[in-house]
Amino acid sequence: MTFRLTGRMTGPRHALRTLRREWRLPELRTLIGALLLSVVVLGAVATLAARVQRAVVMSAAELIGGDLGINAAASPPAEFVRHAHALDLHTSALAEFPSVAFANDRSQLLQVVAADAAWPLRGRLVIAGRGGVERSMHAPPAGEVYLDHRALVALDVELGQRVQVGGMDLVVAGQIEQQPGGGDLVALAPRAVMALADAKSAGLLGTGSRARHRLLVAGAVAPVDAYRAWAKAHLPADAQLVTPEEVQQRLAVAFDRAATFLRLAALLAALLAGIAVALSAQRYARRKTDEIALLRALGASSRFAFGGLAWTLAVPAVLAALAGAGIALALAAIAFAYAHGLLPPSAQQAPLPLGPAFAAAGVGLAVLAGFALPPLAKLKSVPPVAVFRQSAARAPRRFDLLYLVPVAVAAGLIALQTGSWKLAGVLAASLAGAAVLTSLLTLAVLWLVRRFVARLHPALRLGASALARRRALSLVQSCAITLGLTALLLLAVVAPALLDNWRRELPPDTPNWFVVNVQDAQRAAVHDALANLGATRFNDMPVAVGKLVAINGTDVDRMAFNDRETQEDADRQVRFSWSAALPPANRIVAGQWFAPDARNAEVSLDVAWVRRFDLHLGDRLAFLIGDTRIDATLTSIREVDWSRFNVNFFVMLDPAHGATLPHTWIASFHLPPGHAQELATFSRAFTNLSLIDVDALLDRARQIVAQVTAAARWVLAFSLLAGALVLAAALTMSAAERRHEAALLRTLGARRDQLRMAALCEFGLLGAISGFTAMFASALGGAWLAHSVFRIRDFVPPWPPLIIAAVIAAIVVAALGLVGTRKVLHTSPLLLLRR
Amino acid sequence: MDNGRTDDSRADMALISARGVGKHVEGPTGRLDILDDVSLDVNAGETVAITGASGSGKTTLLGLLAGLDLPSRGSVRLDGHALETMDEEARARLRLKLVGFVFQSFHLLPALTAEENVMLPLELDATPDAATRARKALAAVGLGPRRAHYPRQLSGGEQQRVAIARAFVHEPRILFADEPTGNLDHASRDAIADLLFALNREHHTTLIVVTHDPALAGRCARIHDLVEGRVRVHAA
């Protein structure tokens, strides 16, 4: 009679009993610990990134004064208000227009916002009253106006005095300290805020006025999204939808970089955790071999044996994944609270998204399954006869398709985190390259060791020869440790340098003012006047205004475009410039920059334009500038880094043809705060010029850099943990063998200091190989990140700190290895007699 | 038999000497006495078998005599050194100088070739011509051509021969063998036993064998039979 252990009744009980016993095993703890860590790091970063994105969107919402805006030449139809109220959304109406204000025999062109009492719905209108006391307010009541400092200085008025705006006599009730923009973070002229009713009664918003009307809505996320979808479908012909996400391209670029960097950092940590899972699973599988063989020998069904194994792993894995999601949420909340001072108040209220953390739990379980599957699946082929002969348990070495599973999981994880197959491919190739390089270097060192080991001191010989003889293990250990160190060096040394470079792209003296409409004859005078004010970083470019009229011989008016934005671009005026040299923050991605004296007209376009109009090099575009028509050939395509706050253009002509066109100049410069009086004087001296203040925009961009830097520190901490886990798993891979070896050597008479020296030599070599390779791998990785993600040119890896860090890392690996073998050094020789 | 010498003087002359040795361990159900009041002497050049049923304490006694463990009570002297007064480092140094081992499970290092396994004791002692001597030792056990093979490439009998070569390569004065034929088939058993005793004679070592094989025990000059932790001595 065969005793049969069935899976149905006793499998889970056997597994849970096994789990209680096996939980003490370091392999199982490392395996589950790696899973927990990967969920925590992926979940925390994803949650943080989603929350920061939401916060940036909400922060950008302050720029437009609401969650959504509808811009039009006239007030949007009443149904737009009705529909918003039906969705439980708040609404506010406003109009923006330029108007000349008069006071004390002075006049000043102002950018006026006339709004109803509900404005702003998002952001703050901060008004300073008498005595400088600041308060958050809404639009002023009828009969009052708020002016900014520049306006007060230009008109030479104080609070309580009267100004005329649009023929209305209004009392200056407060000074604008902070104001939600009208969708721009730039102020074309000094600002004023008045009541919408006053603007209407003064006839400032009638037919023929230059006012732009806006309906703002605000509320919960879901109804806003619903309203957005409805509004898109019902938008009048001349109206545009304004959303926070689209408002500022510069912010979007800055945020994209931030998000990509954080996701890459999290990816590295997760991959490290995956490596730790694979190494631990390998050891766990070896431990389970005897048990599986015994169960099979006793008659256990395959279902019982492997069902039990699945239960033993699944129960702690699911618990760890859920716990990891919870910890990730908590950490993201803490990190956000820590960085909350960097965000405006409304953004600090951004809700904690739960989805990313639990999605990370799913990904973590996939990583566990993928990386642990090959070694554990091998247990299926353990024959029952292995209870008598261990050698029978060793399957012949051959390639198994199962080994592609962790590769596929890693590739999927990379693709998921990078969001781009191209990026994923480059990153995967880089990691594979690092592994190949490490393997080659390790093999070379091992070869040298085998050749020259006889010449070493006997104590060192033991360690060096141990490394050389455990070749497969040494390769795996060095690859795992190298990848771990590469990730750590990348995040600890290279990333701060990258972020510093990014920060330096927006140095304190970044141009924070633009001046437009400078005439040719005024250039020198404007330059001198600004220089006298203390302006620095002066840079100017010519501007011509025209219209795109034909593409490849076909009139644009006769072309049908797929989307509204392209149609609008085709319809609106185009501002273009020209320059002999490629302007800063521009990179040629196709074609060539203009020749100095191009015979035929040439044009260079930003990639966005090229994609929008589906253009290719060699295409012909016709522009009408005044009465002049220019037919130009597309000879280069540029990528413009809009986050750099330089003057940039989508369309640029070759200088030979551009210079013949009627044009003005636009200039940028930096001026520290506190020059309102002088700027007012400057404006009066050059009345045709418009000054644009971009300080607020710069602040937002710098905030994002600061947020990323703060978030990066958290990710670094997670990655350090992940790296430590990999090191621990790699260094303890051979713990059982080392204990056996140590017991034998001690039996034969080896002294502890001999064993210690051997361990030091072995791990010292391992650390040196890994540190050296990691140093180059992280430098290359940093250069790639600089080029592909941050678009930083001329990034030089920080070699001195890298070298120092690599040496320290190598020493740490050696020390950790030595510490890890401490128990082994105290192994009793009796261990041999008991086996 | 008492030859007129005192117990102490016999101990002084013996290469290995145990007096009133006892060993207990703490188990889940309380104290477990493995050995009780064991006394024996082994003179230089003697061959001694320690026999007994499974669980009688044979391997424990071997461990105590070899200095791998310390008794709970009593004393063990190895070449005049009182082991209970020495720490593990000192005992290890003593083992390196005096002792060779052969184990039931061979205990070869899987990552080392046969030659490298044999070289181990010499390398630990920083012996300059370790490789040459290892090759000679392997040749002496008939495995010269297999010196570059790894343990997994050798049969059980061949592995045990490598282990024997390792045990003798540094010319120990004492050889401890724990069930040296326990994992071998009948034919290999005899061959290994012949080899062991031949080399023992050649190197003039003192041999202490733990075994439950009466044939192997019978080849020794003296048999110490352990029964419930106590020794009964027979002449072979």
Image (tube, coloured by chain):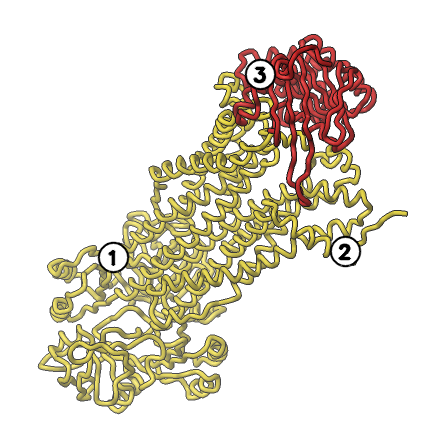
Chain colours: A yellow, B red
Q: Residues within 10 Å of mark 2 (few under 14, many from 20)?
A: few
Label 2: which secondary element: helix
Position in image of residue A734 (x %, y %): 59, 35
Relative to A773, residue A1 above or below = below
Type of the residue with mark 1: Thr
Position in image of residue A634 (x %, y %): 40, 55
Relative to A347, residue A471 above or below = above
Asked if disc 3 and disc 1 are in contact, CB closer than 8 Å, the reply is no
Label 1: which secondary element: loop
Relative to A19, residue B38 above or below = above
Q: Residues within 10 Å of mark 3 (few under 14, many from 20)?
A: some
- Residue ID at (65%, 37%): B25
Type of the residue with mark 2: Thr
Q: Nearer the viewer, mark 3 or mark 2?
A: 3
Residue under label 3: B80
Relative to A39, residue A799 above or below = above
Label 3: which secondary element: loop
Type of the residue with mark 3: Gly
Chain at numbered mark 3: B
